[in-house]
Amino acid sequence: MGWHSLCYVLIMLKVMIVDNEIKRCKPLKQALIDNGFDVVAHVENDVHLHDKYLAIKPDVVIIDTESPNRDTLENICVMSMHNLHPIVMFTHDGDKAQIKLATQAGVSAYVVGSIPSERLTPVIDAAVARFEEFKSLRAELSQAKTKLDERKVVERAKGLLMKQRNLDEDTAYEMLRSMAMKKNMKLADLSHQLIEAASMLIV
């Protein structure tokens, strides 16, 4: 068990079960309780699912369904876009296309059929680990995109200085750096200000 997974279990994960049939999810709910999870809510899969999710704020969402329909996948997409918690799906639909759609929507673990109680914790641990890995990757991609955008802004501002003051590339860059240091600003923020000022002059 990884460190993140161990921490999740030690603090007793809060689980929200999403299922439109109360009887069907009773064995799952009991298995979760037996494995040390805190089942904080059982809600129906409807248009208000995201609002319920925000109000309850579980650590893990478990969706129990015969087959994930379009509304279910849309709800998962909304939860995945705006919140950062693992989603596990228990279903009887092993269709590869459905598995792909659910995974793309944001499901961390897709489990077909019922599983023994003793396998429940490893499945959720795996979902948490996969989710943490994905979250880390998404953060890295976001950071890389931000750096690329900042580099483009700096290059554009540098080009403006070169054109306005007839400077070579190195001199224009050093001027930008010097101005940013004097104003105690990030190079990208100063560059953005210069570009905005130049566009106002053109207008």
Image (cartoon, rainbow, N blue to C red):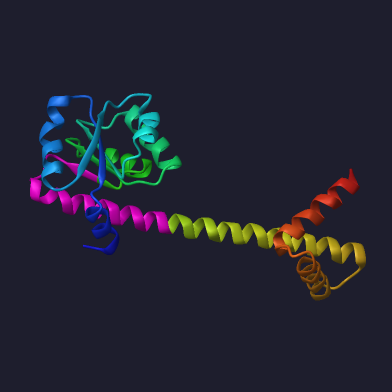
Position in image of residue 47 (x %, y %):
37, 24
Dividing the picture into quadrants, the one containing residue 107 is top left
The magenta span reads: 110-136
Front in this rendered view, residue 62 or 53: 53
Dividing the picture into quadrants, the one containing residue 174 is bottom right
Q: Quadrant of the N terminus?
A: bottom left
Position in image of residue 30 (x %, y %):
11, 38
The residue shown at (41%, 58%) is: 136
Q: How many marks?
A: 0
Horizontal relation, residue 166 to residue 192: left or right: right
Position in image of residue 85 (x %, y %):
35, 46
> Which residue sits furthest front?
11
Horizontal relation, residue 133 to residue 194: left or right: left
Front in this rendered view, residue 52 or 146: 52
Front in this rendered view, residue 5 or 107: 5
Position in image of residue 31 (x %, y %):
11, 41
The residue shown at (23%, 25%) is: 20
Dividing the picture into quadrants, the one containing residue 8 is bottom left
The residue shown at (75%, 55%) is: 192
Whether residue 177 appears in magenta in the rendering, the answer is: no
Q: Quadrant of the C terminus?
A: top right
Whether residue 114 appears in magenta in the rendering, the answer is: yes
Front in this rendered view, residue 164 or 127: 127
Asked if residue 174 is positioned above or below residue 29 in the image, the reply reads: below
Provide the major secondary structure of the magenta segment. Answer: helix
Asked if residue 200 is positioned above or below residue 10 in the image, the reply reads: above
The residue shown at (59%, 57%) is: 146
